[in-house]
Amino acid sequence: MKLIFEQMPVVFNSLNIGFLQTMRLFFVTLLGAFPLGLLICMGTMSRFKLISAYCKIHVWIIRGTPLMIQLLIIYYFPGLVLHKNIWGSGESGRFTAAAVAFILNYANYFSEIYRGGIQSIPVGQEEAGLVLGMTKPQIFFRIKLLQMIKRILPPISNEIITLVKDTSLARIIALQEIIWAGQAFLKGSQGISGAIWPLFFTAVYYLAATGLLTLGLGALEKKLEYFR
Amino acid sequence: MSILQVEHLKKTFNRTNVLKDISFSLEKGQALSIIGSSGSGKTTLLRCLNFLETPDSGIIRINGDVIFDGAQYSRLSEEEIRLRRLHFGLVFQSFNLFPQYTALENVTLAKKLLLKSQKKSGPDVLRTIDEEGRDLLRRMGLADRMYNYPHQLSGGQQQRVAIARALALSPDILCFDEPTSALDPELTGEVLRVIRSLAQQNMTMIIVTHEMAFARDVSSQVIFMDDGHIAEQGTSDEVFNHPREERTKHFLAGYNKS
């Protein structure tokens, strides 16, 4: 027990660095996937059959295969098959590849949630706007958007919380996120080896992050409860 | 000159002829009721007048000016259609209030946006619009409901807000699409009272309704539609008390029985 206390500063320093990488991947994924999801959503709802078919197949493939395979293929394919390392070397290269895989994956899930949100607004809302002489953009931004946000917030919150934990999949391409950092002390690192307790603490980081997000997103949902 | 003239309006949905050659006219300050069984084309007619559906052919004139001509429609820009539909207001069966806005905001939003897009809006203008909105809601008997959200209002109150919202843009003709059909019976009275008072103030109105007693009292003109045709039209007294067509008699008899 005394040993653990002595190891703590080293271990927490490593875990903090790992968690920073986890959070970077988390925020970059959200930043990329929110707008890309909207683009894919508009694509699947497009009047042009070719575009909508392409986007629907895209959604089917991405949602129908594990994120882990997507990560592995996106990271290794360019180097091994095309003999061209497009991701760059080291940790920054792994991060770029992971971010691309995560953004692509989450954008497709978001696009389906957006689509559900758009389609759940009664057509009467648009018609009421039209007969009052509003323009299409006014109807979207002033009338439909907030109603959509209210409706998609619960499923989006779910995805956001899942994403916190999904970032650990990037461990498979050796991204130095928090699981990687904790696991290092199992094999041996900085003079500590065979220690499992750092891994237990990685779980505490996840719980803290998801707990905070649950509170924040719940508060947002509450804020939108003023209308139905 | 008639405020509204509709000539040879036709509309087909998937090879079903919903409107078959509809022609009628309406004088300023009069209320016209359109009656008929479900599926006879009443609602489609209202939706065509409000540009929510595009007729296949026919002409619609307001004060003699052609605002719709089936032969030339495709050349109109979205902007032109948007301005032309402002001649009409429409009150929906299901109210369609905007849930995230208060009663007052529902009434004032469209006018504020309209003036903003014409670059005519300023603090004074916005204040005037709010004042007009409050006046309209007071006229609807909703003085104490202005800052409530739609879900806090009864169906009858929501429909009265919707009427105020339609009036806020001062349309030439106000259309009602079965305004009381979604209401509990005890709430229809308050909405019908408001429409009746508008008729007394000589608002030009077209009312699609199943409330026969109401249609009889409030309207000066009545159209009976059957299977996409105007089967009979005339004054309220003519259609309700002395119908000439068998179909009209049959339809009205069905109502008198129940």
Image (cartoon, coloured by chain):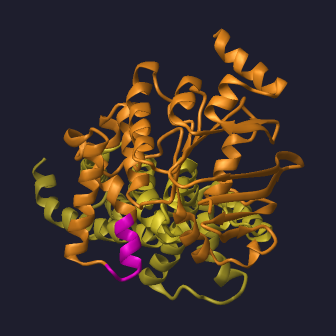
Chain colours: A yellow, B orange
Q: Is residue B244 left or right of residue B146?
A: right
Residue range corresponding to the magenta coloring: B111-120
Q: Which residue does the image show at 80% across and 53% down from the upper left?
A: B11
Q: Is residue A141 left or right of residue A213?
A: right
Please say whether residue B113 is one of the residues in the magenta stretch: yes
Residue, x 57% and y 64% (percent of image)? B85
**Relative to B178, A22 lies left or right:** left
In this rendering, the answer to whether B121 lies above or below B197 is below
> Please, is residue A219 above or below residue B55 in the view?
above
Res. A158 in view:
yes
- Total marks placed: 0
Tell me where residue A115 appears, x and y as whole percent.
Answer: 58, 55
Identify the residue at image location x=26%, y=40%: B142
Q: Which quadrant holds the N terminus of chain B?
A: bottom right
Please determine whether, in this image, residue A123 is positioned above or below residue A142. above
Residue A46 image position (x, y, % from top left): 69, 66
Quadrant assignment for the C terminus of chain B? top right
Residue B137 x %, y %? 28, 47
Q: Say if the magenta span includes residue A107.
A: no
Q: Majority secondary structure of the magenta segment?
A: helix
Q: Camera-side residue: B204 or A80?
A: B204
Q: Residue at x 66, y 82 (%)?
A: A78
| B213 w.r.t. A41: above or below | above
Relative depth, front residue between B7 and A85: B7
